[in-house]
Amino acid sequence: MLEFSADEEIHLLDPGAGIGLLTAAVAQYAETSCGHRTIAATCYELESAFQADLHETLAGLRNVVATVEPTDFIEHTVRLLCAGEKPNYTHAILNPPYKKINTNSVHRFLMRKLGLETSNLYTCFLACTIALCKPGAQIVGIVPRSFMNGLYFKPFRYWLLDRVAITHLHVFDRRDQAFSDDKVLQENIILRMIVGGKQGEVAVSTSSDPSLADLRQRQCSFFELVTPGDEECFIHVPTLGSQAHHGLPGFALREIGIDVCTGPVVDFRLREHLRMQSEAGTVPLLYASHFASGQIEWPKEGRKPNAIVRNAETEKWLMPRGCYVILRRLSAKEEKRRIVAYLLDEGSLPEASVGFENHLNVIHRNRQGLPVAVARGLVAYLNSQAVDDYFRTFSGHTQVNATDLRRLRYPSLEQLEQALP
Ligand SMILES: C[S@@+](CC[C@H](N)C(=O)[O-])C[C@H]1O[C@@H](n2cnc3c(N)ncnc32)[C@H](O)[C@@H]1O
C-alpha cells in the first residue's frame, strides 16, 4: 500500500518494530518497485529480547540505513514534540501493540499533551505516528477495528479524521483466520492514510485471510464510511456487493417508545443475595449463560446462580415480570451471527420480578415488559440477515452494546406487532 515517488527521500518510521519484518518488507518492495532506493528507517522497539534479531534483520537490508530506538515510542515521541522536533517521516508502517491503558497511566497522561484522550496502546501508537509524519506522508497500519465504533474511541476518531485522509481500508472478513496464531479475537483492518490529505474516495477491500487470494475491492464515497452529521463519527466498513451500507430504514428505538439497558444486577456487588437455586423469597436471576444456542434455559445447572433474594437492598436492581427481548452483550462462541435476540416470555417467570445480570442487554418499555406481539416482532427483526449485515458494517467485534442497539433502525410498532401471525 505504500507508494514511493521518484525523487523524494524516504524516511520510514516503524514503531513497535519487533524483529523488523515490516521494515524488511518495505525495503524489499522499494527495491523491486522503484529500483535501488535507499531508505532511512527508524525502528522503535522496547523489548530487549528482540534487539539482537532486529539489528540482524536491519543489517541484512542493503538499501536501508537504520536507526534503532530501544525505547518507549510514546514517551520518546512526546518528548521530541515537546522539545520542538519537526515532523520528518515521509512513510510509516506499523503493527502496534494492543493493550488497554487506564486513566492514570503514564501513556494516557502523555497523550493528553498531544490533545488526545484515548484508552488503548494502539491508538496512542497511531496518534504518535501521525504526529511525527510530514504533511503528505503515507501511513499504513494494521490495527483492531475497535476504534471505528464505540463510545470510548470517539475522541480518537475526531482527532484522527481531523489530521489524516483515509485512502484505503482493508478488512479481513474472518477473524478466526487472519490472526489465529496470536489469539486475536478482534477483527483487524489495514488502514492507509495520508497525513494532512484531503479526504476523497476510499478504496475498500476485503479478503478472508492474509493470503489475499479472494481479494475484492471497490471505490467508496467517504460518506459510506462516515455518515454526514453523525455525532458519534462512527466509521463503517461498507460491505462489498451487498446493500447493507445503505443502512436500515425505519425508526430509532426511542422513537417507537422502546429502550434498551444493560442488565442492572452487577453480581459481585450483590454477592450475599445470590442463590444457586430458587428458594422462598427469591426471584429468577438470568445470566448470559441462560441464553445460549438459541434457547433460554432457566434454571440451569452450572457455575452461575439462578436466583436472587428479593429484599430492600436488591429491589432497585430488579425489573417487573414481563415480556422482554434479551441479547447477550458478548455473543456465544457457537453463534454465527453477531446479534442473537431471545424472547423472554412473561409465562416463563414464576415470580413478580426478575433480575438481569450485567452481561445482558434488556429491551424494555419504561423499565417494564413489552407487549408480546411487539417483542416477538422485535426478535424476528433483530435475528434477520439484514440486521446482522448492517451491524457488521460498523462493529468488528463480538460485543453488542446498548448504544449499538439504539443506533439500529427499527420497523414501526404496527409493523412489529403484525410481523408474526
Ligand atoms: C504487535 S508487535 C509487532 C511487531 C512487528 N512490527 C511485526 O509486525 O512483526 C508490537 C511490538 O511493539 C513493541 N512495543 C510494545 N510497547 C512498546 C512501546 N511502548 N514502545 C516501543 N515498542 C513497544 C512490542 O515489544 C512488540 O514487538
Image: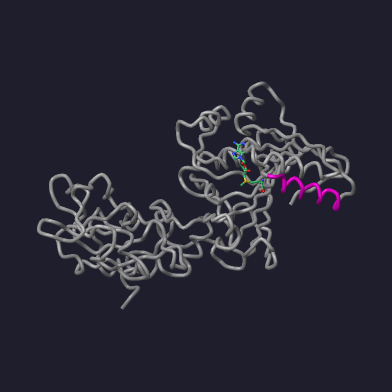
Up the image or down, 85 lies above or below 418; here it is: above
Q: Residue furthest top?
A: 83
Quadrant in which the C terminus appears = bottom left
Q: Nearer the viewer, residue 361 or 40?
A: 40
Q: Nearer the viewer, residue 82 or 267?
A: 267
Q: How many marks?
A: 0
Left or right, 72 with respect to 68, comes to left
| Percent of width and height locating residue 157 | 55, 43
| Percent of width and height locating residue 250 | 43, 62
The image quadrant in which ligand 1 is located: top right
| Percent of width and height locating residue 21 | 72, 48
Highlighted range, magenta: 19-33
Left or right, 158 with respect to 342, comes to right
Q: Magenta segment: does it hold 22?
A: yes
Q: Quadrant of residue 87?
A: top right
Coloring scheme of the render?
Answer: one colour
Q: Quadrant of residue 236?
A: bottom right
Q: Magenta segment: does it hold 162?
A: no
Q: Nearer the viewer, residue 192 or 266?
A: 266
Left or right, 35 with respect to 57, comes to right
| Percent of width and height locating residue 402 | 38, 53
At 54% from the left and 56% from the top, the residue drawn is: 183
Up the image or down, 321 lies above or below 153; here it is: below
At 65% from the left and 54% from the top, the residue drawn is: 169
At 50% from the left and 62% from the top, the residue drawn is: 390
Q: Main secondary structure of the magenta part?
A: helix
Q: Residue furthest bottom?
A: 421
